[in-house]
Image (cartoon, grey):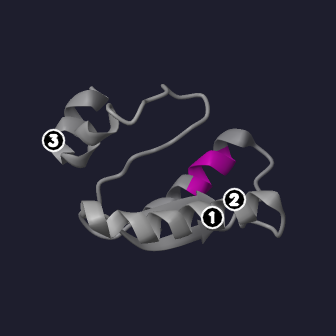
Amino acid sequence: MRVSLFAVGRLKAGPEKELASRYTDRFAKAGPAIGLELAKLVEVQESRATNADTRKREEAGMLEKALPEGAVLVLLDERGTALDSEALPIFSDASAMAASAT
């Protein structure tokens, strides 16, 4: 399975960029052994809209344009439900993901 990471905004030099780099390196090294390939990291520009709803819509549109055709989308948000490692494999099946979204 090819995995791509999409983010709003650009990582600036500093601890967050170093940590992200460390994890993508680890993924690239460990992933192939379990059938995962880190395809790419895409950073889209942050919206400059002053209204939060407009900003979210614009950023969502940029992310959607960057997705390849037929991609399975998994959204991560710090306010979302925390999943442990054992819960994540259900998302490798698109139909299971669609069922969990309803």
Q: Which residues are magenta?
A: 54-59
Instruction: Judge the density around disc 3: few (<14), some (14-19), many (≥20) Cα neighbours within 10 Å.
Output: few
Position of residue 16 measured from the top left corner of the image (x, y, whole percent) = 75, 57
Q: Is 80 placed left or right of 9 in the picture?
A: left
Give the mark count. 3
Magenta span: chief secondary structure: helix
Q: CA distance from mark 2 to mark 1?
A: 5 Å
Residue at point 68%, 50% (across, down): 55
User: Percent position (x, y) of residue 52?
Assistant: 72, 41
Amino acid type shown at disc 1:
Arg
The disc, 3 or 1, on the residue closer to the chain's N-terminal end is 1
Q: Residues within 10 Å of mark 2 (few under 14, many from 20)?
A: few
Residue tagged by mark 1? Answer: 22
Q: Residue at x 27, y 41 (%)?
A: 89
Residue 62 in sight in this render = no
Mark pair 3, 1: CA separation? 32 Å
Quadrant in the picture for residue 17: bottom right
Q: Which residue is mark 3?
A: 95
Whole-angstrom CA distance, mark 3 to mark 2, is 32 Å
